[in-house]
Image (cartoon, rainbow, N blue to C red):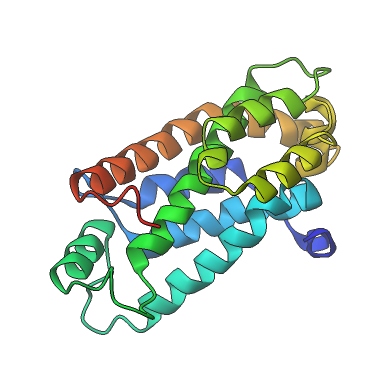
């Protein structure tokens, strides 16, 4: 992922706008708009490089799969998360051998969002000179670690040892432009609020359809 960073620009404001735009009606998520927002979030993972390789590669593959599903969705069964879940359950597709499930794929992205959002929130609460390894581990332990194998958890733990201070993390992501860093920090609370709403809606939909434990 590190070789991809040269022309990557990550925007907290764009991420906020993306998450807000994918909120559909009172309780649904628009999948195409979610993909757009998540692609912005993926830029953050690219900039983090090997530090977040334990989540970045999986997210990229799931985004690609979800895009392929949408591109072949001629009947509009995968326009929103709710429609997708209802369709796959009614057609009994979730147990079909060889079937690539949109609900299962989206769940993996949902779990990744939980981790990244919590990590960014925890980073916002520490001082500039503080390290970020501990808060990263804390965020990971209560989110993705619950779904990863021992091997991946071990690799993630090793990667986290190399996490920089908050100050150096901001420079890694936004460069040394102090104004850009200031604007990013100003926009972070609103972005986190939007991402929490997206996560909350998604969580409720998976609970309502009893799909949180999809293997």
Q: Please, which residue is most extreme toward the front here?
A: 150
Judge from the rendering whether residue 89 lies leftward or rightward of residue 13; answer left or right: left
x 35%, y 78%: residue: 99
**For residue 135, what is the image quadrant?**
top right
Question: 16 and 120: which one is in front?
Answer: 120
* 132 displayed left or right of 110: right
Residue 126 placement, left or right of 113: right
Q: Residue furthest left?
A: 90
Image-quadrant location for residue 56: bottom right
| Residue 89 versus residue 130 in the image, above or below | below
Image quadrant for the N terminus? bottom right
User: From the image, which quarter does the C terminus lie in?
Assistant: bottom left
Q: Residue at x 83, y 37 (%)?
A: 171
The mark total stands at: 0
In x, y percent, where is residue 95? Answer: 28, 70
Taking depth in this image into account, of 25 and 97 the one nearest to the observer is 97
Residue 42 appears in the figure: yes
Residue 145 point in image, percent of width and height: 57, 39
Position of 130 with respect to 87 (left or right) is: right
| Coordinates of residue 22 in the picture (x, y in percent) | 35, 52
Question: Which residue shows up at 37% across the image and 51% down it?
Answer: 21
Please name the residue shown 37% across and 75% down the image: 70
Query: Is residue 44 in view?
Result: no
Q: Position of residue 46 (x, y in %)?
A: 72, 55
């Amino acid at each position: 992922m590190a070789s991809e960073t040269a022309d990557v620009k990550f925007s907290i404001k764009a991420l906020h706008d993306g998450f807000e735009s994918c909120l559909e009606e009172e309780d649904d998520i628009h999948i195409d708009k979610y993909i757009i927002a998540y692609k912005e979030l993926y830029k953050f993972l690219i900039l983090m490089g090997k530090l977040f390789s334990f989540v970045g590669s999986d997210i990229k593959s799931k985004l690609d799969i979800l895009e392929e599903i949408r591109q072949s969705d001629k009947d509009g069964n995968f326009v929103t998360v709710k429609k997708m879940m209802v369709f796959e359950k009614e057609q009994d597709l979730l147990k079909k051998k060889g079937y690539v499930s949109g609900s299962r794929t989206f769940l993996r992205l949902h779990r990744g969002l939980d981790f990244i959002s919590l990590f960014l929130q925890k980073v916002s609460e520490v001082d500039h000179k503080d390290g970020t390894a501990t808060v990263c581990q804390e965020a990971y332990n209560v989110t993705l670690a619950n779904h990863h194998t021992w091997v991946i958890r071990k690799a993630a733990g090793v990667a986290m040892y190399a996490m920089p201070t908050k100050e150096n993390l901001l420079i890694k992501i936004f460069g040394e432009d102090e104004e850009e860093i200031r604007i990013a920090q100003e926009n972070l609370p609103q972005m986190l609020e939007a991402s929490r709403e997206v996560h909350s809606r998604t969580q409720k939909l998976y609970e309502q359809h009893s799909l949180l434990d999809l293997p």
